[in-house]
Amino acid sequence: MAEFFAQYMPAWGAYLLTALISVALLLAVVGLGALFFIWAERKVAGRIQDRLGPTRTGGKFGWLQSLADGIKLITKEDLAPADADRLLFRLAPYVSLAPSYAALLALPFADGWVGWEINTSVFFLLAILGLEVFGVILAGYASGSKWSLFGGMRQAAQVVSYEVPLGMCGVIPVFLCGTMSLTTIGNMQAGWATNWLIFHDPFTFMVFWVYFTCAVASVNRAPFDLAEAESELVAGFHTEYSGLRWSFFFMAEYNSMFVVSGLAAVLFFGGWNGPVPIFASWKAAGGGWEIVADLAGCLNFIGKAVLGVMVMIWVRWTLPRLRIDQVITTCLKYCVPLAAFCFVGALAWQLASLPSPNDWLSPDPAGRAAVREPWVERAEDGAERSGTSGAEELARLAEDKR
Amino acid sequence: MLAAIDLHGFLFVLFALTACVFAAGVLFSSNIVRMAFNLVLSLGSSAGLFFLAGAEFVGAMQLMIYVGGTLVLLVFGVMLTAQHRFLEMRTNAGEWVLSLLVGGALLMVLLQAAFSVSQWNTPYAQRDQVEIDESKSATPIAAALTGVRVDKLEETNPRLRAGKSGYLMPFVIVSMHLLVVLVGAAYLARPRMAVRQMRRGG
Amino acid sequence: MATANREQIIELDVRTDELLVNMGPQHPSTHGVLRLVLKTDGEIVTHVEPHIGYLHRCAEKIGENLTPRQWIPYTDRMDYLAAMNMNLGWSLCVEKLLGYELPEKARHIRVIIAELGRIASHLVGMGTYGLDLGTFSPFLYAFREREKILDLFEEVCGARLTNSYITPGGVTGDLPAGWLEKCEAFLDQFVPVITEYHTLLTTNAIFIQRTAGIGVISREMAIDYGCTGPVLRGSGVDHDLRRDGEERYTEMYDGYAFEVIVEKDGHYPRDHDYPPVPPEAVLGDCWHRFYVRMLEVMQAIDIVREGIEFYRASSGDWGHPIKLNTKLPKGEVYLETECPRGQMGFYLVSDGSAIPWRVRARSSCFCNLSVTEELCRGCLLADVAAIVGSLDIVMGEIDR
């Protein structure tokens, strides 16, 4: 995008504008996403429980309910308990929200539609999602309430344990594709649904479920919502919060749900590549058609991620909560060994060159090997253009414009 | 005039400043959790520096291991073992002197290492090679942090080449430092029990 | 030389701090206003001390200033989830003092109503137990069905929660026309719903993990602490006042065929329709208490069906409430009935006037709650909610 703007303005302006647009778009994902998911959660929960959920705010279906809630939360008094460590208490919600938002930076929404193209984005996402726990721990510690303290401790124990199997599950697609770049992993699954990594072999199919379990646990959702276990800890780490600060925790939670579901969509479900390659030819056509194809891919991706979030909502309203020792046992006794087993299995499958469904159904000789990482492509492009670097290229374009 | 703003330089200064300011915060706060919080911001900023240098793997590693792992464990340990809420740590003069000695020595080593690389003395000479945003080629220092000394690739002597395995050492030193912090936190938070003991003199 | 008292600092190993936590009186899972003072070592609870009395309303003292019929509404507010059964206990107690013989029709009405009350009460117990374990939906499914029972109650007496329907001398009115058909229709649609509950809770893997082997009350312990109702039967003690109680109470159930829900040889009387007891479950644990309640719901359905048949076959009067100012004969009387939560006893001493001289109530939940301290020692924090929930207490009854 920066190249495009650089035609009309100086290079620094192009950078700034590109950055601003990306940031605004991602903020919209956080804000609107939270609004939508909270409304959807209430609606889905209502339907699951033979209720209607919100019906009136904003006319039909209560679709403005979250906005009304938001306005209510903004106008509420922002309280801090007398016993609290004021500074940390006030900062904790931001510490929780910031990593959750930063995770979106590296999450591609379509081929190349990513805030920040880095070639270790899988690792970056896993690392930055693990930071969210720090806000929760700070909130638990700084609140000056024993229930909050319990919530913080539980969250720390849980997230630190679940990072291990989550990372192991995330590593399997990385090894199968030979890259840590999410964009590349997504592009490698182009074509029919059979090309999705979840159908690559039995082990990847199994590991997806391990991933999903660990993802639910790492974003602190039922049945692993121990940090805010209502029936035990009143409200856990956010017992003492009110108003907008309280809602920041929820924005962080819903956003993290979206991110882990999106990560699952890219790693296992082809990302923006649909079950049927409708837009493949458009994509190849380039120009305006390519943008339309990318837009469709973006919607496809968001649809998959939202589906993942819906499953989490469904699980939450169905299952009882686990106990802390059972949560840790689930992690160490089941998730870690299963993930390790699948890791070895998937690698052995690859090593033995055993066939995957895609090989029989739609044999594509070019296949995954043809897909290259974006920076490799760029380097090749750059090499064609007589070895000049990207920055110089931009500067040259800007010069031409002037 | 605005065009003269060097984004890379600006971001570098920004991250470096926050890293230093919050590192000083670690030093001067007496509440152990606030210390940890300052350390998070400081380490996060240095992760930002790694990202800026194009060493994304190291940056993400920093975030995952130190911020997400070690510090969370530190605070967890403090919360579990603290006898009083909002545990305060008081350092006496002797400890100050000792820590200044150790810290100063460490700083000297780092500074010496930093200034020994001739290219870094004149960063502006290579400015056109520093590429940001679109380009994903790592800067020499980033490559060095992952163990590849690009400035030594021409070295013909294989022993020299093998010996110059980049700047993993400072990274490891930081990790050792954190280990010390962890042990120290557990030590300070350890419950002390005052007991009267009958002791027979002489 | 002299011995010196010298203070010395001994450094212990890294040890977690013991926390003193107040669970309640405002806490989501203490079923009202129970207050538990917990001493915890990390997540492990080392000591629990229940504090009661936050809902004390001097009900017994009020009973010494009102005539027995006037006091009926106060019994509603004791166990407000099974108001009909409370009414019944007090009415039987007063009738015992008066030596009143109940007409046949009133007897069957009472059985139908009391068993419906038992279903409604167990539904709440089941739903809130789900809440205690962190699942929200079964709670609403339970309340959906309970609402239908309350609709039936409303049609009978005009009130949904505090019914005051069963009074000394019978009931306040006959069942309305067409009510029996509605009741039968409700039962028909309710039976398959119970399978849903079993899917969501009883046989759910997480539910079993959370309840099986947790809070085990042994047979002896249950008897020693005076536990009654499902808590007692969940520990394998074959005791149900509907069969083993006083003549005046058991004669109400004359002609009704029912078995006491208690485990015999690893089987429950009515468990053939449902998956068997999971291998993890230990007799007397939370899971068994829950299962006993669920089976009692099934059994109550059959008793109500029988009652409807008996009611249709019976003729004559449905009984009439005694007059408000009926003089009570001199004497004292005590009667226990099998309420949903256990044996609820009423004690009445009369000096010959219309107003009792002394009124006392024996609360089942009070005795059941007293087990908490021993049960929760050494369990995890989350288990406290599971254990207290499985006792299914109602603070209105404990504090009175």
Image (cartoon, helix red, strand yellow):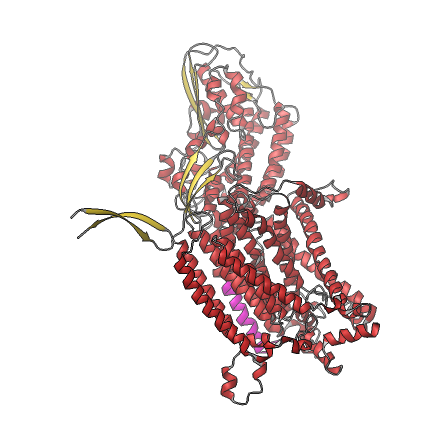
Residue C262, placed above or below residue A248: above
* Depth order, front residue of A343/C300: A343
Magenta-drawn stretch contains A340 = yes
Q: x%, y% of residue C78?
A: 50, 26
Residue C125, placed above or below residue A288: above
Left or right: C230 as drawn, with respect to A100:
left
Considering the image in quadrants, where does the C terminus of chain A appear?
A: bottom right
The segment highlighted magenta reads: A336-355
Q: x%, y% of residue A221?
A: 58, 52
Q: x%, y% of residue C60?
A: 46, 21
Residue at (51%, 42%) from the top-left corner?
Answer: A83
Q: Is residue C399 visible?
A: yes
* Depth order, front residue of C315/A105: A105
Left or right: A12 as drawn, with respect to A321:
right
Q: Residue furthest left?
A: C1
Residue at (74%, 61%) from the top-left corner?
Answer: A21
Q: Is residue A367 visible?
A: no
